[in-house]
Image (cartoon, rainbow, N blue to C red):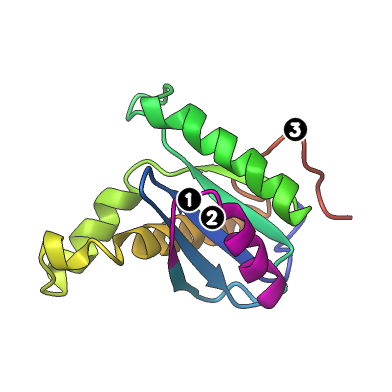
Amino acid sequence: MTGFRRGVRLGVDVGKARVGVARCDRDGLLAVPVETVARTDAAAARIAALATEYEAFELLVGLPVSLSGGDTASTDDARAFAAELATATGLPVRMVDERLSTVSAHAALRSAGRSQKSSRRIVDQVAAVVLLQQAIDVEKSTGTPAGAVLPETQEPA
């Protein structure tokens, strides 16, 4: 066990139209929404700017896999976007299983009285919060960071 690594992380929920971004505090106590970035050619640069602004040491990108653990149509897209983020930020990028994070986000918003239509603009941020909080909790309970580091990126020293 390596223990919990202190520092700000960004959680990134990749969608076809929008990318949700969340961050945590240095002690990993709480993940909070940051913004929803339009999925354009400028998306990776915007997230890189957020990583700089919040002094993040790594990015956790949701890896959409099927409930059985296999790849989905979105899996390759998320990996490709994560590689773009690695290039844009120069930071380590971890791919984190995001099974049910969007479902959990919709459920949380519904229980808060938000309709699916009124939630559309923020559900990606909430999904990013869910995946980041789950990753933080895993690392705190096991001492091992969640997910797998993209081969192109390096673990911080």
Label 2 is placed on what type of residue? Ala
**Dot 2 lies on which element?**
helix
Outermost residue on the right side: it is 157
89 lies above or below 152: below
Frontmost residue, 116 versus 18: 18
Q: Residue at x 21, y 65 (%)?
A: 119
The x and y percentages for residue 135 are 54, 55
Residue 148 appears in the figure: no
Tell which tag, 1 or 3, sits nearer the viewer: 1
The disc, 1 or 3, on the residue closer to the chain's N-terminal end is: 1
Mark 2 Cα shell of 10 Å, populated few (<14), some (14-19), many (≥20): some
Mark 3 Cα shell of 10 Å, populated few (<14), some (14-19), many (≥20): few
**Which quadrant of the view contains residue 154?**
top right
**Dot 1 lies on which element?**
loop
**Dot 3 lies on which element?**
loop
- Residue 43 lies in the magenta-colored region: yes
Question: Marks 1 and 3, how far apart in space?
Answer: 25 Å
Residue 151, label in figure: 3
> Over which residues does the magenta segment extend?
36-53
Frontmost residue, 100 versus 140: 100
Residue 40, label in figure: 1
Label 3 is placed on what type of residue? Pro
Question: Marks 2 and 1, how far apart in space?
Answer: 5 Å
Question: Marks 3 and 2, how far apart in space?
Answer: 22 Å
- Residue 3 lies in the magenta-colored region: no
Label 1 is placed on what type of residue? Thr
144 lies above or below 122: above
Q: Are marks 2 and 1 in contact (CB under 8 Å)?
A: yes
Mark 1 Cα shell of 10 Å, populated few (<14), some (14-19), many (≥20): few
Residue 43, label in figure: 2
The overriding secondary structure of the stretch rendered in magenta is: helix
Tell which tag, 3 or 2, sits nearer the viewer: 2
